[in-house]
Image (tube, rainbow, N blue to C red):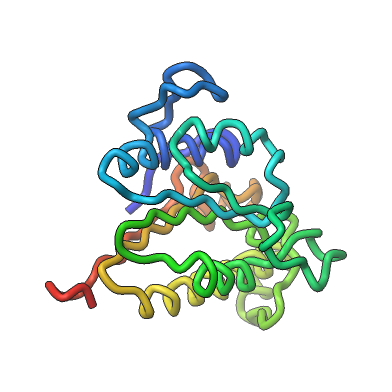
Amino acid sequence: GAVPSYGSTIHGELRQLCNGRLVDGLFGHKNTHCIPNQLKIDGYKTVAVHANKSSVYGRDEWYGGIGFDEYISADTPSFPKSPDPARWGVLDDIRTLNFVKNQVKPGPGKMVYLLTVTTHMPAIAMNGVVLNGDCLKRMDEQVCTHTGNLKLVLSAIADLALTLHNTVVVVAGDHPPPFSNFMKSGAFDKTNVPYFILVPRDGRGN
């Protein structure tokens, strides 16, 4: 499906995690309606993972207020360092996904929230991305690089989902990409962002 989206990445996070609102401000601690807090009530362990520094946009303060027990970020000692810091200065999304799979270990009784980084702008081709020739004939290189990065990361998420049991995987956009010229032509939606939900295929959680 798709949902209306206005504003920045933070607005997208609040829409997804807290129905778009906070009870007592960004740094409040009474936001029991937020998904992480609701799941904690049900006995879940809640973990947030982001390859940027924890202080960016104050996440080290308000993530706890909406219910995350643990926040793993670039300045967490166990988090791997980027082998190519000149590109984004952070670990790329594929390596972050591998870290989540092997170290955070999503599964029953745990909510793992991953905010991606290297699919954001400016678009720099991730390792393994080959620009589509047909795309380059119709769009500029930034658009084709961005969509190539998204395809790579979404494929990696799908591969990770296949290894999980009794686990629901939700993938949601935060805001439309800033391609105003192509939005005017209808190539990108100006106000809506997509989401999809992967659920176990049968009653055994497979």
Q: Which residue is drawn at 67% across and 63% down?
A: 78
Q: Residue furthest top?
A: 24
Q: Which residue is drawn at 55% across and 24% down?
A: 26
Q: Quadrant of residue 121?
A: bottom right
Position of residue 16 measured from the top left corner of the image (x, y, whole percent): 42, 42
Q: In which quarter of the image is residue 153?
A: bottom right
| For residue 114, above or below residue 191 | below
Q: 103 or 139, which lies in front? A: 103
| For residue 138, above or below residue 41 | below
Q: Which residue lies furthest to the left in this view?
A: 203
Q: Which quarter shows the C terminus?
A: bottom left
Position of residue 72 measured from the top left corner of the image (x, y, whole percent): 60, 53
Position of residue 123 measured from the top left corner of the image (x, y, whole percent): 72, 62
| For residue 114, above or below residue 27 | below
Q: Which quarter shows the N terminus?
A: bottom left
186 horizontally vs 199: left or right: right
